[in-house]
Image: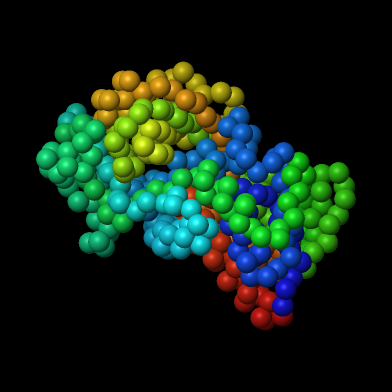
Amino acid sequence: MPLTVGVAGAGLIGRLLVWQLARAGHAVQAFDAMPGPEPRFDGHGAAAFSAAGMLSPTAELDAGEPRIAALGWQSIPRWAQITAELGVASMQQRGSLLLAHRADLGAAQRVLARIGSQPPQHAPQPLTAPQLAALEPALAAAYAWLLPGEGRIEPVTTMRALYEEARGVRWHWGCPVAAVEPRTLRLADGVERRFDLAVDTRGLGARPQLPVRGVRGETVWLQLTAHGLTRPVRLLHPRYFVYLVPRNADELLLGASSIEAEDRSPVSLRTAVELMAAAHSAMPSLAEARILRLDRNLRPALPDNAPRVECAPGLLRVNGLYRHGWLIAPALADQALAQLAASLEAA
């Protein structure tokens, strides 16, 4: 039976749920504090726009739980299906690369030990220098490993398509939601809106109802004509967490710091210099790259850094995607909708 649905929050998980609920025939309205659907890159918009879009379940085992990797492997085929249904070619699945310089082999071996217990189809595959050159001629490193099955997705294109293809949805921009309760969205101006189902995907906006905190991430957007990189790359380093992701034939995204601070100020000199120096060491042609943008944002994290899906009569909450948003969002959306279907059937 079609429901009236109010969704608070139009970030990644919010747009996914809005799109899927509208496709299922429900009457959906979406509310968000931002002035419109497009990215702002000022530290205040949806964190999904600032993300790299890496689909790297194996690599995330270095710092994440096996559950995150499992959700990632569920999400990759779902992203392929979702982007096809949206009609956008924003996803690629050609594997990703781990690189290490000779002096950092010890750090690399420790990372490989943490992520090594994988099924054979997901296990890191060591590459010789000629094999690396054949896959990615622009890269230079003493050691390299291919992580098969991993991929990347282009965030801005996908976020835009989720908005544009959500047919029949009423979008309320510049309309922050102060609280979400069963069947009710209470707007910041005090007005209450009633629905059959209230959905809370506000991220940091869910405070104080959820104990969510912001974790700062910083990135550098680079332009280098015909750079030649086709796969996401992580540089294994004892001090830095560095990745380089091709956006298109001429642009790349370099990241990323992970700082326990709710600071939306511009990118620090230290982060920018360290990230760019590390990236240049692995891809020498970046010496001629131009800096398009220094970006930063806050990612919503719960105390255990794990995502949470809550379903109760008239209420659905999804939060805490932390730094794994693009990796796990489809699996979490599917989980949330499955719990909703079971709840409606039981009622």
Quadrant of the image for the N terminus?
Answer: bottom right
Position in image of residue 46 (x %, y %): 60, 41
Which residue is nearer to you in this view: 44 or 60? 44
> Quadrant location of the C terminus?
bottom right
Query: At 20% from the left edge and 51% from the top edge, which residue is drawn?
Result: 125
For the point 52% across and 29% down, the residue is: 295
Q: Is residue 64 visible?
A: no
Q: Position of residue 98 (x, y in %)?
A: 27, 42
Give the vertical position of 239 relative to 203 (above or below). Answer: above
The residue lying toward the viewer, choosing from 198 and 232, is 232
In the image, 172 versus 346, the foreground residue is 172
Q: Residue at x 25, y 25 (%)?
A: 284
State how the image is colored.
Answer: rainbow
Residue 131 is at least partly visible in this image: yes
- Could you tell me residue 302's position as x and y percent? 57, 48
Q: x and y percent of residue 344 in the render?
A: 68, 77
Residue 189 placement, left or right of 235: right
Residue drawn at 58 percent across, 32 percent down: 41
